[in-house]
Amino acid sequence: MKKIVFIVLALSGFLSLNAQYIYPFHNIGLTDEERVDNLLSLMTIDEKIQALSTNLGVPRLGIKSTGHSEGLHGLALGGQGNWGGFKLVNNEAIPDAYPTTTFPQTYGLGATWDRQLIKQVADIEATELRYYVQNPQYNKGGLIMRAPNADLARDPRWGRTEESFGEDPFLVGELTVAFVKGLQGDNPRYWKAASLMKHFLANSNEDGRDSTSSNFDNRLFHEYYAYPFYKGITEGGSRAFMASYNGWNGTAMTVHPVLKQITRDRWGNNGIICTDGGALKLLVEAHKAFPNLTEGAAAIVKATVDQFLDDYKPYIYDALNKGLLTEKDIDNAIKGNFIVALKLGFLDADQIKVPYTEIGVTDTVAGWKQEKTKDFVRQVTAKSVILLKNEKQLLPLDKSKIKSIAVIGPRANEVLLDWYSGTPPYTVTILEGIKNAVGEYVEIFFEPSNELDKATIAAQKADIAIVCVGNHPYGTDPKWKYSPVPSDGREAVDRKALSLEQEDLVKIVYKANPNSVLVLVSSFPYTINWSQEHIPAILHITNNSQELGNGLADVIFGKYNPAGRTTQTWVKCITDLPPMMDYDIRNGRTYMYAKNKPLFPFGYGLSYSDFVYSNINLSSSNINKIQTVTVSADIKNEGKMDGEEVVQLYVSFPDSKIQRPVKQLKGFERIMMKKGESRRIEFKLTPEAFAYWDENTNQFAVETGNVNIMLGSSSEDIRLRTKLKIKK
């Protein structure tokens, strides 16, 4: 008897040291895999089939549920996509919306070229998500965040260009990593939210996306299209992504072997892979990959996809009955769900010790109400502004020397929300931002159009005319697969034109007042050749920010010195682009392979200051294939204002025996410098920076020979050059 008592006491002591648990999967002393394996052994087949949905949770075993949320540039619980759901009012379903901090579109976030900024944006988003999920007043949303979008904007006609950080794999990879880390947090064991990246892979045509195939070789898979996802998993720590609708080389991504062979077995994604909405049905009806939904559902599970975004249960049961699936197949798939649940803390018995659980419970101050958050959104917005032209230094405007301003155009007095936006707690239009900046001492004339010559008259009366034009994020009409303006684009609709119809208004305003500033409020590039030739000052900003007007006004009036950079090549003409369905970027697509001079190159953006580059140096001019080299140079702000410079490092391979890019981005830093300040900046180039995908060995390899090292302010504005030699 004493022996039994001793064992019980010893066991209880062990449990107190290793956290009390009811089931072995509660024991944090076990490995993640051991905990999940134990959980699976306790689940019934019905519970396992339920786990193939997007809602984590096993109620019988005390594992609470959580689902998906949208959040490309702020948590979406409302907005045009109605992500907040519905509420019943007098038995009528009415869209429900909840305020959340709303940032510029992803395209604008990318224009900041600022890793730390992107991480902070995502952290605010994750905090607000926890708040809504955990606050008993709301219980809204799910802790699996469908963000970031790691797709590459290889063509400006792509309808979802607004959702991408840009066209370059290195830039998008770096910003993807920053966003993932911001969402998931810095705790070594637990995540604030789970980052589910979209959409794997090569999903950059909307027309026919449910049945088309994106065709390219393994080199482009590893070097270009898959690279941001690879970085998001291996460096960012994401353990979830969504498979895209399209196919790759004839096989639908929903069932493609690379999901397991590459992303799981090589990269280490042991978490979630989910379908896109309705992908099972499209697999049969659009791709015609399987004769029926039962066979399609079985194939999806065998591809280790563990979450369906459509009706699937009848077909899984049917597949089990017909021997097309086994319980082990389901186990192999759904274990990823519970790895993510574990990282969110759902498999722990002692929830008090799980971090982030106080958000919205004891910490009940909503983030979107805090002044520091509003100030940060304003800063992000200003940092996203790209100064495309500034002839004779028309900008910044000195409000003490201006008596009147004409604010003109359809985008001047509205903040448009895109399909994946939330509902901002407030919005500031450009007109309001300008009024806030100048106060009552400058007269403002506002006209949304030139109806009855009103824009002309306003421009003639004013000292300065600011004309605000651009796209509508959902084509002025929320109907799906419809956009009445050819140059507009959105999900399910690619752009059919790159010209800006509203440029005619710009011409009219300029004729009335040569002191005109063009503000292009847009989700993607336009071929504004006339404006580039004639308008003295041009600014670009994306839609959607709650601080759109204040952030832009800070730049216009010199409170903030612009440093945004293009993340995509702005072509001069739509004919400069290869056919839309040509996914081989080596045929003239992106800055890496473009054959025509662009309107604005990749990485381009002006400043109110002048930055001088000098004294480039390499830690070694001769290295072997496994060495790292440090590139350093001096940067000086010789302008009259404090400002930021985005220093960009590119490489090229003149001795390569294969076709490689004309140049490739391999480093960048956005640095703040006071006027007159000099700074030494360094970039470390590891062997990865020089590597290409070797089809023969099926791995990355480094070539011997010369490497051109280039530092500059854009892909075309190269200020310093040197050579590096790689030996065997």
Image: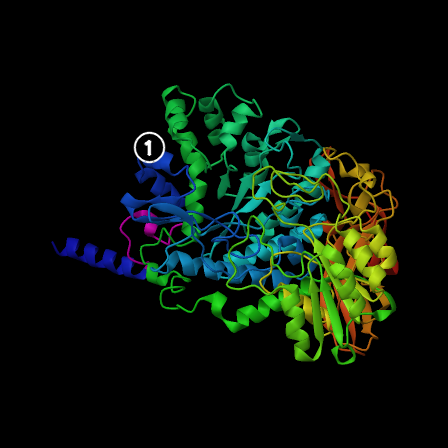
Q: Report the front residue among 670 and 472.
A: 472
- According to the picture, the residue beneath numbered tag 1 turns out to be 45
Q: Quadrant of residue 609?
A: bottom right
Q: Report the front residue among 417 and 700.
A: 417
Q: In which quarter of the image is residue 47?
A: top left
For the point 32% across and 33% down, the residue is 46
585 over 123 or under it: above or below: above
Q: Where is residue 60 in the image (x, y as percent from the top left)?
A: 27, 44
Residue 122 visible to an observer of this rendering: yes
Q: Report the front residue among 270 and 719.
A: 719
Question: Is residue 720 toward the left or the right of residue 19 in the image?
Answer: right
Q: Position of residue 22 (x, y in %)?
A: 26, 51
Identify the element where label 1 is drawn: helix
573 over 110 or under it: above or below: above
Find the residue positioned furthest to the left: 1
For the point 34% across and 42% down, the residue is 38
698 over 176 or under it: above or below: above
At label 1, the amino acid type is Ile
Residue 685 visible to an observer of this rendering: no
Q: Where is residue 728 in the image (x, y as percent from the top left)?
A: 81, 46
For the point 30% across and 35% down, the residue is 44
Magenta-highlighted residues: 18-31
